[in-house]
Image: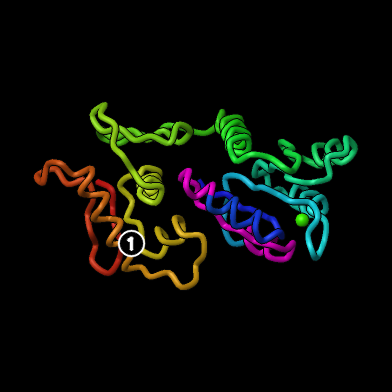
């Protein structure tokens, strides 16, 4: 799942990026309103973590703008301003939750899970294909009922395939979905992750799970 973090404070931004990435989220971290606008125009996010005091504007204005133009991604406001009035204003503008600073990573993760769970009540949270079952909320994968250990990147990669079974996925599209930026992506890295995924999931060589289309991409069979 992709999370956009809008936070200008370097240390906190790095902490969020690291903490969330370690919990299998794909994180894009931006530090200004302008970068946040660009990021949201470029791709879809499953959730946004939004700081209010930003160097080139107010997070509340960003939120107002997004909701007006129809972006309905769940938004968690993160701010040192914990006055009741700010909280109410944020929620009125369409934020889904509010977490005052300072906070613990555990608390943030719990809030995000609940945010995504609410959002997911209309969306599928368990993806299944052949004997594979991927639970987006529990962040677990099983095959024939047996747990399969995955790194966060392998999990994100498998998620992309399970959302598009049978479809030929171009290399660039896969990379775009699992890496946070479109720049400087070494697509050879994708082959490394694909072979790891195959080692874990293709137990029977007679029944391949993925098809390689050389130079084009991959397909979940
Ligand atoms: Ca700030």
Identity of the residue drawn at 30% across and 66% down: 216
| Residue at horizontal 71 percent and vertical 36 percent from the top | 96
Left or right: 100 as drawn, with respect to 19: right
- Is residue 144 positioned above or below 157 on the image? above
The answer to whether one can see residue 164 in this image is: no
Q: Residue at x 28, y 37 (%)?
A: 148
Query: Horizontally, is 132 left or right of 88 in the view?
Result: left
- Residue projecting furthest to the bottom: 184
Question: Could you tell me if residue 12 is visible in this image?
Answer: yes
Which is nearer the eye, 134 or 102?
102
Q: Position of residue 60 (x, y in %)?
A: 81, 50
Q: Residue at x 25, y 35 (%)?
A: 130
Where 116 sits versus 77, above or below? above
Residue tagged 1: 190
Colouring convention used in this rendered image of the protein? rainbow
Is the residue marked by circle 1 packed among few (<14), some (14-19), or many (20+) residues within 10 Å? some
Residue 30 in magenta stretch: yes
The image quarter containing residue 171 is bottom left
Q: Is label 1's Cβ within 8 Å of ligand 1? A: no
Looking at the image, residue 18 sits to the left or right of residue 205; the answer is right
Label 1: element kind: helix
Q: Percent from the top left, x then y, of residue 108?
A: 62, 38
Give, as a single range, the part of the protein colored magenta.
Answer: 19-40
Q: Is residue 31 magenta?
A: yes
């Amino acid at each position: 799942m992709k999370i956009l973090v809008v936070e200008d404070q370097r240390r906190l931004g790095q902490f969020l990026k690291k903490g969330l990435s370690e919990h299998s989220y794909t994180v894009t971290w931006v530090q200004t309103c302008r970068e946040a606008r660009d990021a949201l125009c470029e791709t879809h996010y499953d959730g946004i973590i939004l700081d209010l005091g930003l160097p080139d504007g107010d997070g509340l204005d960003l939120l107002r703008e997004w909701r007006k133009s129809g972006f309905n991604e769940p938004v968690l406001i993160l701010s040192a301003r914990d006055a009741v009035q700010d909280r109410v204003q944020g929620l009125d503008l369409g934020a889904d939750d509010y977490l005052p600073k300072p906070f613990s990573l555990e608390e943030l993760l719990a809030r995000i899970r609940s945010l995504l769970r609410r959002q997911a009540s209309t969306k599928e949270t368990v993806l299944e294909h052949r004997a594979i079952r991927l639970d987006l909320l529990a962040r677990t994968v099983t095959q024939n009922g047996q747990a399969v250990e995955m790194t966060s990147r392998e999990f994100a990669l498998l998620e992309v395939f399970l959302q598009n079974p049978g479809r030929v996925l171009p290399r660039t599209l896969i990379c775009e979905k699992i890496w946070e930026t479109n720049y400087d992506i070494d697509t050879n890295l994708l082959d490394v992750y694909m072979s790891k995924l195959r080692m874990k999931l293709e137990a029977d060589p007679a029944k391949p799970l993925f098809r390689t289309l050389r130079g084009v991409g991959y397909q979940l069979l």
